[in-house]
Amino acid sequence: MHRSRDLLSRGDPVGAAAEAVAVERLDPANAAARDLRLAAVRNEPIRFRATSHLEAADLLAAQAQLKAEGHPRPAILLYHQASPNSPFQPLVYRRAWANGIAPLALQELADLKRIESAIEPGMGRILHLHWVNRVLAGADGRADIERRLDAAIAALDAAAHAGWSIAWTVHNILPHDSPFHADEARLRQAIADRAGMIHVMAGSTVELAAPWYRIPPEKVIHVPLPSFRGTYPDIVDRSTARFVLGLPGDARVVSLVGGLRPYKGLELLLDAFELAIRERPQLHLVVAGLPSRAPEITTFMDRAVALANVHLHARMIPSDDIQLFLRSSDAIVLPYVRMLNSAQLMLALAFDLPVIAPDLGGIPETVDPTIARIFPASDVAALGAALAAVEPVSPAVVAAARRISDDHDADRLSDDLMVALRRLVDDPRDAPGVDRV
């Protein structure tokens, strides 16, 4: 009974019902078990909400749906690693089913061998790699690093041997917080060598990766980050958001929203803010996001709470509350010292906000001076001047944000990527071939 209640509370009504039925078989008069079973069957499951662990039954169901929808050349796409707290993967795969591709999250590369027998003959197979930072995360010494690298590369070779077409989306040149730069580069070189298609979102990716590993240009497709417009609730206005967050109605508010990690230049931001507030005393800085356990983040938070006009929300921000921090702001700041692609940039544009951002990665190619103030990365004085210059959002900024969001329409970009993935699995000799800029 305790297990049945626990499963129901964790969103697994099927498991809860099964446990309750087992109790009823032993004790048919057990009213509590009957009530739990009825409560469970009233809550139909939603696939992957209770668990993200991929099973053979999920593959069978996906293939059945592809056939029911009449796709002439259906394909299964397994993506790894999954990022369930970001809208990125739902956005890039939102046109997958329409293109005859069923996207399913693969939590561990080692699971591939366990479930691939459920894939029917003739079904296309795509293994789509995203972030692979978990391969070496927490490695303990040289022997452990080598073991993990060997296992990951062996898994890729086994997948290729089993008929999987390998694609890779390059999110970062290297993981932001990994101490194993050379080994991370080795892993990415192994992936680049084995992938039939390499998806870049910033046009400078091949050049920026070159000091660490070689991305073969002939394998590259360029499909930018999709717009985040409409992915988060957006029903509050500026005044409501400021009231809820305790911000003055006449303040100039700059916000940083997202996980608090060392590569985001948080100490640099506070240095620049202290310069800017001397010139603009009505300037307020809002920082909202889940802090990492890095010592630098603890130091940052201690300093932030001691500064006037700094508002720290050091926690995971629920999706429904993202709008409060965006709608209360006059600008979004990205003080990053390292970056390639920025989901936070697309989030700012989705809420019609200007950005203060460094001259790194794909930012300069995405925005223009109407919507962005670009500063030299790590330049405290330049960042301080940009913060001091913040003004209320103008109609020109709103128009520019919507134009860029339209240029990054998620449906169109998803279609572009799915077309390239279809070519990869249907005729690898004809892939890649999309260059949407």
Image: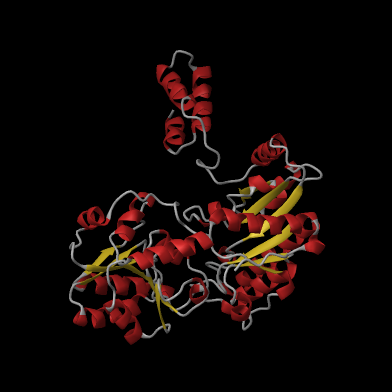
Q: Is residue 194 visible?
A: yes
> Is residue 69 shown left or right of residue 90?
right
Nearer to me, 306 or 338: 338
Image height check: is 131 above or below 283? above
Percent across and percent down for residue 64 are 70, 36
Q: Residue at x 32, y 71 (%)?
A: 298
Closest to the observer: 197 or 141? 197
The answer to whether 10 appears left or right of 98 in the picture is left
Q: How is the image coloured?
A: secondary structure
Q: Position of residue 126 (x, y in %)?
A: 71, 54
Horizontally, residue 399 falls left or right of residue 360, namely left
Q: Quadrant of the N terminus?
A: top left
The vertical placement of 295 against 31, above or below, is below
Name the spot of residue 352 as percent of width and height, x first.
38, 62
Q: Residue 97's image quarter? A: top right
- List x then y, in percent, for residue 41: 49, 25
Front residue (pair 146, 232): 232
Q: Is residue 358 above or below residue 348?
A: below
Quarter containing the C terminus: bottom right
Q: Is residue 353 visible?
A: no
Q: Is residue 270 above or below residue 64?
A: below
Residue located at (39% from left, 66% from top): 292
Q: How many marks?
A: 0
Residue at x 32%, y 86% (from the top left corner): 381
